[in-house]
Structure formats: structure tokens, C-alpha cells
Amino acid sequence: MVSSEKKSTEAADAVGTSTALRKEIVDALNEDLAREYKAVVQYVVFSASLKGAQFGDIAEQLKAHASEELSHALKLARQIDYLGGSPTVKMMPAQTSDDSKKMLEIDLQAERDTIQHYRERIRQAERAGEFALSETLREIIVEEQDHEIDLRDALGID
Ligand SMILES: [Fe+2]
Ligand SMILES: [Fe+2]
């Protein structure tokens, strides 16, 4: 009798923990989603606004980045829904500049921050046993690293 009571308490604890963990992941993924919306807006605007022949190639790449950031947002929204959450309608405030080099620096910093957040998110997903989420985040982080490389190359940073 005592052991079965103990068992049901443990089960309740396990369910409680996983619910709390799921909520923590959903909240964090919604921040990631808000950051992806911001990335879409910045890449749309910057790809059209970069001035100077030396930025011709990167302007084309930024258009591709915009599409990829949108696909990241779609993937995150689907994962949030799967986990029982509601995908946010809020975006993080976009940054801008009149200076082409500064635009690329803003994007580079944003990509670096984003990569840091996805590293942490992958760890969270693994801890929670959410392996499909982890796999999706790994696909996204590969593209974020490509974006970082494109921006570093355009800025002449090693
Ligand atoms: Fe992204
Ligand atoms: Fe990116």
C-alpha cells in the first residue's frame, strides 16, 4: 500500500516536471521566434538598402537569408504548437542604420547572438528528451552559421 502510494506520487512529480519543462521550452522558443521575425525584417530591408558595388554579392545573399529566416520561423511555430504552446505574434524590435557596413555589422552580431541562443535551446531540448525538436534546431543552427560566415566574408573578418 505504502509503495503504491509512493509510486503514484513519483508519477505525479514526473508529469509535473515535464509540464514545467515544456512550458520553459515553449517560452524560450517564442523568444527565438520573435528573434526570427526581426531577422526577416532586417534582411528584407538591408538587402534592398545596401549601397555600393562592393556590397552587390552580399545584397543577393541577404535576400536568401531573409527566406531562410522565414523558414526558421515556420519551423519554430510548428514545434511550439506541437508542444502545446501558442506561437507569438510579437517580434523583437528591428535595428537599422543608414550605413551599409553598419547594417552588416548589426546582422553579424544578431547571427552570433542567435547561434548562442540555439546552442542553449538544443541543450534544453536534449535534457527534455525532445529529440525531434533538437533535430529541427540543429538544422536551423547550421544555416545560422552559414549566415555568419557570409557576413564575416563580406566584412573581411576572419
Ligand atoms: Fe534564423
Ligand atoms: Fe540567420
Image (cartoon, grey):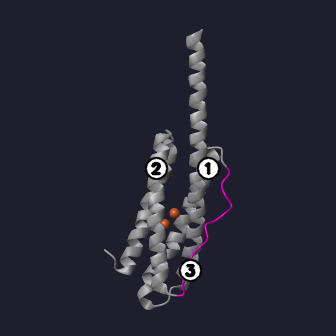
Badge 2: few (under 14), some or many (20 or more) residues near its Cα, within 10 Å?
many
Residue at label 2? 122
Quadrant of the image containing the C terminus:
bottom left
Disc 3/disc 2 C-alpha distance (Å): 29 Å
- Say which amino acid is labelled 3: Thr
At a point 58% along the width and 13% down the height, the residue shown is 4
Disc 3/disc 1 C-alpha distance (Å): 29 Å
Which of pointers 3 and 1 lies earlier in the amino acid sequence?
1
Residue 114 image point, x, y percent? 48, 62
At a point 48% along the width and 74% down the height, the residue shown is 107
Query: Does residue 107 appear to the left or right of 37 in the view shown?
Result: left
Of residues 142 and 104, the one drawn nearer to the viewer in this rendering: 104
Q: Is residue 70 magenta?
A: no
At a point 58% along the width and 29% down the height, the residue shown is 13
The span shown in magenta is 86-98
Residue at label 3? 96
